[in-house]
Image (spheres, helix red, strand yellow):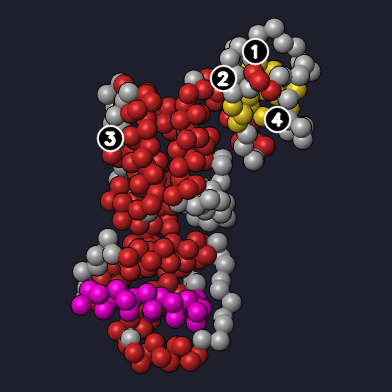
């Protein structure tokens, strides 16, 4: 590691073996060292680096203004989310999540509480991400000694959802709204009370999330040969197939998006399971 500049006494900017800027932490690293000096490996405690160059620069700026302990905390939450939600999360979420947690703690100490109006939707549609949020609240309490309200678990969950989305997709709010609209059609047309804790609901919601992302990214499934399967579904699960017809019409009229035969098939299969279990 080649020393570049000091952020504080224990955190510096250095160049790694690939000449990429990284944030290096170690006790007293910023003392008695000049630009171009080699940092001894035994003095390095931790290395932070984000894939995106712009995000990496912004992270450096954040570290100059808030304690490094917040970055360590956020990285721990991020690592937990990669294990329990998705391994390919965009690591730039560390930047936004770190800033959010710092500000949330500052607000809490001042007695300011921000209500999360999407909390109920997050708990229902993003259950895995919400569990990461709850884990984060426990970790923040353990590390920082401050218990944040449950609303913050929802806000943290949104950051984790964002880390899964492509930049071309719409916001979490718009995706969630589409999912709510489809679920409402299902409840009305099928006349069922859906158990949001069932494995069938979870699979349906997971399918909806990826469908909504494709819709807002203007991506479509290439139609595969599903004629035989479609005939089977239409005859065996007429209620579910008819419900998907309503969904198809709604999406075409409101979002100008045509469902592929494959999407109609899989939505019908998911809804048939929900309908059978609910009945």
Image position of 42 (left or right of 124): right
Q: Nearer the viewer, residue 55 or 254?
A: 55
Over which residues does the magenta segment extend?
258-279
Q: Residue under label 1, please give it.
A: 30
**Is the N terminus in the top left, top right, bottom left or bottom right quadrant?**
top right
Label 3 secondary element: loop
Residue name at image x 36 percent, y 40 percent: 135
Q: Quadrant of the C terminus?
A: bottom left
Residue ID for mark 4: 21
Residue 90 in view here: yes
Between the C-alphas of marks 2 and 1, the distance is 13 Å
Q: Could you tell which of marks 4 and 2 lies nearer the N-terminus?
A: 4
Please give the residue where the numbered disc 3 appears in the rendered image: 149
- Closest to the camera, between mark 4 and mark 2, is 4
Q: What number is the disc on residue 64?
A: 2
| Residue 180 sits in quarter | bottom left
User: Which marked residue is nearer to the observer: mark 2 or mark 1?
Assistant: 1
Foreground tag (1 vs 3): 1
Q: How crowded is the residue under tag 3: few (<14 C-alpha within 10 Å), some, or many (20+)?
A: some
Task: Please say whether residue 141 is one of the residues in the magenta stretch.
Answer: no
List x then y, in percent, for residue 194. 24, 67
Q: Give the distance between the C-alpha atoms of the residues marked 2 and 3, in whole angstroms.
A: 28 Å
Q: Which numbered disc, 1 or 3, marks the residue that appears first in the sequence?
A: 1
**How many other residues sit within 10 Å of disc 1, few (<14), some (14-19) or many (≥20)?**
some
Tell me the SS state at disc 2: helix
Q: Quadrant of residue 7?
A: top right
């Amino acid at each position: 590691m080649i020393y570049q500049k000091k952020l504080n006494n224990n955190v510096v900017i250095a160049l790694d073996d690939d000449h990429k800027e990284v944030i290096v932490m170690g006790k007293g690293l910023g003392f008695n060292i000049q630009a171009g000096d080699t940092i001894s490996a035994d003095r390095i405690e931790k290395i932070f680096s984000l894939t995106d160059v712009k995000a990496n620069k912004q992270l450096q700026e954040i570290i100059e203004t808030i304690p490094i302990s917040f970055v360590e905390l956020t990285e721990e939450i991020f690592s937990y989310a990669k294990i329990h939600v998705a391994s390919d999360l965009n690591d730039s979420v560390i930047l936004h999540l770190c800033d959010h947690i710092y500000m949330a703690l500052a607000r809490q100490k001042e007695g300011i509480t921000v209500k999360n109006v999407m909390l109920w939707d997050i708990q229902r549609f993003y259950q895995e991400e919400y569990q990461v949020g709850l884990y984060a609240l426990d970790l923040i309490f353990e590390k920082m000694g401050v218990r944040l309200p449950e609303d913050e678990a929802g806000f943290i969950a949104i950051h984790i959802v964002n880390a899964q989305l492509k930049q071309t997709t719409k916001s979490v709010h718009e995706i969630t709204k589409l999912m709510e609209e489809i679920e409402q059609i299902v409840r009305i047309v099928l006349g069922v009370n859906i158990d949001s804790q069932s494995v069938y609901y979870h699979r349906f919601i997971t399918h909806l999330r990826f469908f909504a992302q494709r819709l807002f990214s203007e991506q479509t499934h290439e139609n595969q040969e599903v004629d035989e399967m479609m005939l089977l579904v239409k005859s065996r699960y007429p209620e579910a197939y008819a419900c998907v017809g309503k969904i198809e019409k709604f999406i075409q009229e409101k979002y100008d998006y045509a469902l592929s035969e494959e999407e109609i098939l899989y939505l019908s299969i998911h809804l048939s399971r929900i309908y059978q279990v609910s009945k």
